[in-house]
Image (cartoon, helix red, strand yellow):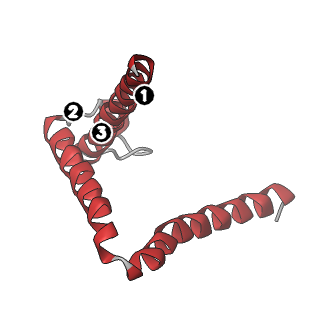
Amino acid sequence: MDTTDIFLYAGYLLVILGAIFAILMPLFKSLDNPKSLLKTVVGVVLIGGLFFIAFSIADGDVAPKYAADPFNITETGSKTVGGVLITVYVLFIAAIAGIVLTEITKLVK
C-alpha cells in the first residue's frame, strides 16, 4: 500500500465522519426544541421537490459511446445526473440572487 493510498483512505474517512457529524449534531442540539426542526424539514422537502421537477425535465438521451461497456450509462442514470445538474444550477442562481438582493437592501437602508 502506497503512502498516497493511506492518505486517500484517511481523507475518505474524514469526509464520512464530517458528514455524519454535520447531520447528527444539529439533530441532537434541536431535540430540546423540536419546532426548530420544522424549517429544516421544509428546506429538505423543497429541495427534494426541486430535484423531482429537475429530474422530470432532464433529458435522458445517452450517447452511444457512453452506453458502451466501460461506462454503462442508462437513461435513468443520465436523467439523474441531469436532474442534479439542473438542481445545482437553480440553487446557484437563487444564492446569487439572494446575495444581490441582500446587498441592495443594505444599500437602501
The image quarter containing residue 42 is bottom left
Q: Is residue 49 left or right of residue 69?
A: left
Residue drawn where x is 65% and y is 68% of the image: 13
Q: Are marks 1 and 3 in contact (CB under 8 Å)?
A: no
- Label 2 and label 3: CA atoms lie apart by 18 Å
Foreground tag (1 vs 3): 1
Q: Where residue 59 appears, x then y in whole percent?
A: 19, 32
Which residue lies under the disc numbered 2?
61
Residue drawn where x is 42% and y is 28% of the image: 99
Q: Nearer the viewer, residue 25 or 7?
A: 25
- Label 1 and label 2: CA atoms lie apart by 35 Å
Q: Amino acid at mark 2?
A: Asp
Residue drawn where x is 35% and y is 25% of the image: 97
Which residue lies under the disc numbered 3?
87
Q: Where residue 98 appears, x then y in whole percent?
A: 36, 30
Q: Nearer the viewer, residue 65 or 6?
A: 6
Q: Nearer the viewer, residue 38 or 3?
A: 38
- Label 1 and label 3: CA atoms lie apart by 18 Å
Q: Is residue 83 left or right of residue 71?
A: left
Foreground tag (2 vs 3): 3
Residue drawn where x is 84% and y is 60% of the image: 2
Q: Where residue 14 appears, x then y in whole percent?
A: 67, 65
Label number found at residue 12: none
Q: Amino acid at mark 3?
A: Thr
Label number found at residue 99: 1
Label 3 SS:
helix
Tell which circle, 2 or 3, labels the residue nearer the N-terminal end. Answer: 2
**Residue density around tag 1, few if under 14, some if 14–19, many if 20 or more, within 10 Å:** few
